[in-house]
Image: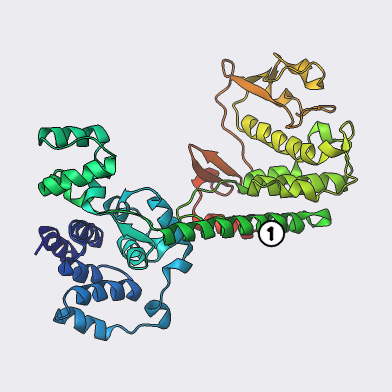
Amino acid sequence: MNEYVEKGILALQKGNKRDALYLFNSALNIDRDDFDAWFWLSKTVDTDKERLFCLREVVSIDSNYQAANADLAQIKTTSSETNFDWKQSTHHILLLKYFIKPRSIADVTTWDIGKALKEIPIIAIERMIKGGGLKVLDLASTISVFYKTAEIKHLLTERGLQNKGTKANLAKILIENDPEIIKNIPVNQRRIAICTELGEKLLDDFDKRKEQEHQHMAYQCYKLLENENLNIHNLKKAYKDYQKFWRQYSWGNYVERSSFHTLTQIFRARPESLMNLSNDDLGCARAVAITNFLWFYKIANRMIPKDFLIPGFDLNASNIKAANHILRHVEIANLLEHRPRGATVKISLNVKNSDCICSKLDGKEFLIPDFPNLPLAGCTNEVGCTCTLDFNYDNAEDDEEEYEDDDIIYESGKKYYWDGEKKELRLLTDEDYARLMSDGE
């Protein structure tokens, strides 16, 4: 029995499933036909679907493995477990993407993606190999991946062998004349997989389906918010739809691209450059800005009514500029937020345009409470200010910041919220977030 399996059994007996899982994975990365490793892995995984796969692997390698046959007979399987089709699983296709280029299977089996896959990575990978989405490289191809061309030529020269030709042919010559060379590669790095033609087609279909769904969700977002529908309830629904989409098309531990806090700023934004817009037109521009911010998709620009016009802008440019001015206004507001009292900010224009009214601000320095409401009225820049803000903290005071109840604050890549009762910042948990999102519905 493989020493990794022996150590894994001991870890499992001590209740250390995490270490046991790692050790059984290591054994299978060395020899995927290790039936003992598959059997004991079946004792470590959490679901009947995973256990079923492991035990079937055992009996396919050794049909007389009595313990595995006995365990198989006891598993009550549903049709979804028996007939699971990985090709219909978004997260299995996401995993397939990592094998567009040759990759060591062992590198992936340690990733913490089992929750999204609903099975541990090594089982998912073996499913895709069996299903024709992945193939394991032969020894010559493994040599070709592991060594650089110059290294292969050097090894051939050392052995007095021909060292001219393509890298693939050189690797083939090397392994044919010296099979022991494979031992120079770490044992757990010898199984390398790559997408097959079927795998590439599945990826192509997946990307098309994702793009179509992306466009549809962007359209639905705008329709949800347009005209008189832009309210906090619909804003929360739009945000939840956004989260649901990205969780479907990314791993479970994905980092949110956009924050609800920023959406509420867009919801209320009225830069000086848009002060002359009617409330209806401003609402339309905000809906476009929110859609573009969430979905990175410009379909919303084409949804604005044809008679929509920002004073001072030509008709064709108004659609894009209105949304861009709102987004830039909020971006600047976020840069200014929670800066210490007494700090100053200097404006430097990246694009010198003497015709734009904002050019009069170039080089000026302001206390943050006195900072102008950019973009200014009459700003003609398509993106709504191309300025850089330089902060000066020489005269800043070490004040305690003031927050409103349930404010969400972003510090060092983490999210906190202000607990009004305890008067303190608290790390935002999933439960806190659910409460804040449902508040007011």
- The reply, left or right, for residue 339 in relation to residue 289 is left
Residue 180 percent across, percent down from the top left: 10, 47
- The reply, left or right, for residue 286 in relation to residue 412 is right
- The reply, left or right, for residue 241 in relation to residue 269 is left
Say which residue label 1 marks: 440
Which residue is depicted at the point 34% across and 53% down?
111
Q: In this view, does 59 lie above or below 400?
A: below
| Quarter of the figure with the N terminus | bottom left
Which residue is depicted at the point 73% across and 17% down?
352
Q: Is residue 419 above or below residue 331?
A: below
Q: In this view, does 27 lie above or below 171?
A: below
Q: Which amino acid does label 1 sit on?
A: Gly
Residue 28 percent across, percent down from the top left: 21, 60
The answer, for residue 373, to whether it is visible in the render is yes
Q: Is residue 399 above or below residue 55?
A: above
Other residues around mark 1 within 10 Å, as few (<14) / some (14–19) / many (≥20): few
Residue 323 percent across, percent down from the top left: 75, 41
Q: Is mark 1 on a helix, strand or loop?
A: loop
| Quarter of the figure with the C terminus | bottom right
Q: Which of 49 and 336 is in front in this view?
A: 49
The answer, for residue 270, to whether it is visible in the render is no
Residue 4 percent across, percent down from the top left: 14, 58
Q: Which of 207 and 9 is in front in this view?
A: 207
Which residue is depicted at the point 42% across and 68% down?
86
Q: Residue furthest top?
A: 363
